[in-house]
Amino acid sequence: MGFEKKVRPGSSSAKPLVTTEESLNELAALAATAGATVVEQVVQIRPNVEVSTLIGSGKLQELTGLVKGLEADVVIFDQELTPTQLRNLEKALDAKVIDRTQLILDIFASRARTREGQLQVELAQLNYALPRLTGRGASMSRLGGGIGTRGPGETQLETDRRKIKGRLRKIENDLEAVKKGRTIQRRQRVDVPLSTIALVGYTNAGKSTLFNRLTGAGVDADARLFATLDPTVRQLQLPSRRQVLLSDTVGFIRSLPTTLVRAFRATLEEVRQAALLLHVVDVSNEHAEDQTAQVLRVLDEIEAGETPQILVLNKADRLPEGVGQVDSVASRLLGESAHRSRTRAVAISAKTGDGFDQLLAMIDEVLPADPVVETTFRIPSVEGAAIHQIHEHARIREQHYEDEDSTLVVTADASESLRRRLRQFMVQ
């Protein structure tokens, strides 16, 4: 069920980025992801919201007839409902009613696999449910209550609220421990150090397919929305031979519930702490421009908007103009955003691997941390570990042994972190 507010022609809201039909189609895809079968879509166009039921009385009567005629079990609204609206709609329709936020929360709940992911989803669900306890069912009504007295229903309500608040405190403490653990892990990475690159993008843009092809990981990658929920980190070697960490993260979506953004802050720390973001866009999607804008908006919300980005134009082989028009496509997607001037772009196909050489070379060029410098080292042959690190983590340009003392002299493109580890062998 979609609600479209009628606006005057020429007003600032007359041309939304996403039409009502497009928004409803995305809602239908979310419902299918959650396991539902969509049997009908209904739109209400009116100048103002009906406070008690969101939609007008005539549309409510029409919807009631549809629910009975189609024997529908659930009615999903493409807008967040207030507790009062939710209660009134369920009573009038005699069916379960959920809104977009609850639908996304349900999908996240089914996707969470790790303990951290499950805690984050539960935190979001409880924060969403807490203000919606009032009046839920006869057991919570004010039975026998009067002025100055308290009915048994309100007592139950307070009990439920107290339990939820207690559980919220427990989850927040557990997630704080997770956050501290992640902080320790990041400090260990800095000590190595390894730069972290985070994959971000709209859900179902192809991030996990790209992640698997780059790292050989077995992350679940299919056409479902939010196929990846729990973050995965793998090591990746760049053309310069320096090692980086690549992180696959949860996909974003239009109107991502604020409860989810807050709950997943521990996971999103991986995005905030990354040295570089690979913003993956499915350029074959007709809504790519809006999806790009939504991702940039979420990045700004989590204070990652200033992190250097590479715009990865996935499925670029499907573009009518081909992959040769990368700059023009990137300009169209970024529009007038502040990210436009500082974002590089590359066209790839995560499915076939086309464009991966250019992507890896661009990462090497753009990655701000751990710069690569041509360096000469003199390493005694007995220092096997140092020689191994040179061959493993640097690009060798020239090498030879000095016979008199069996010392390896090697000139290589080495990262700053490797240079620090092998500083004692560097030739000044």
Image (spheres, rainbow, N blue to C red):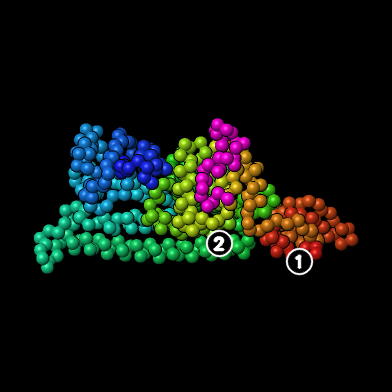
User: Which amino acid type is marked by label 1?
Assistant: Gln
Which sits in the foreground, 362 or 214? 362
> How far across and down, in percent of the image, does residue 107 sit?
38, 46
Alpha-carbon span between mark 1 and mark 2: 26 Å
Residue, far right: 404
Residue 149: x and y, percent? Answer: 12, 66
* Residue at 10 percent of width and 63 percent of height: 146
- For mark 2, does the 10 Å Cα neighbourhood hold few (<14), some (14 to 19), or many (20 or more) residues? some
Q: Earlier in the sequence, mark 1 or mark 2?
A: 2
Q: Residue furthest top?
A: 320
State yes or no: discs 1 and 2 in contact (Cβ < 8 Å). Answer: no
Give the structural element (helix, strand or loop) at label 1: helix
Quarter-of-image position of residue 323: top right
Q: Which residue is mark 2?
A: 186
- Across and down, in percent, residue 87 comes to 22, 50
**Residue at left offset 74%, top offset 60%:** 386
Q: Which residues are magenta?
A: 316-341
Q: Is residue 45 left or right of residue 237?
A: left
| Residue 379 visible in the picture | no
Tell whether position 332 is magenta. yes
User: Is residue 67 shown in magenta?
Assistant: no
Residue at image point 68% right, 48% down: 239
Q: Nearer the viewer, residue 49 or 316?
A: 49
Q: Is residue 195 left or right of residue 15?
A: right
Quadrant housing the N terminus: top left
In the drawing, does residue 115 fall left or right of residue 217? left
Q: Which residue is mark 1?
A: 424
Q: Is residue 70 visible?
A: yes
Identify which residue is drawn at 51% across, 40% down.
Answer: 282
Q: Secondary structure at mark 2?
A: helix
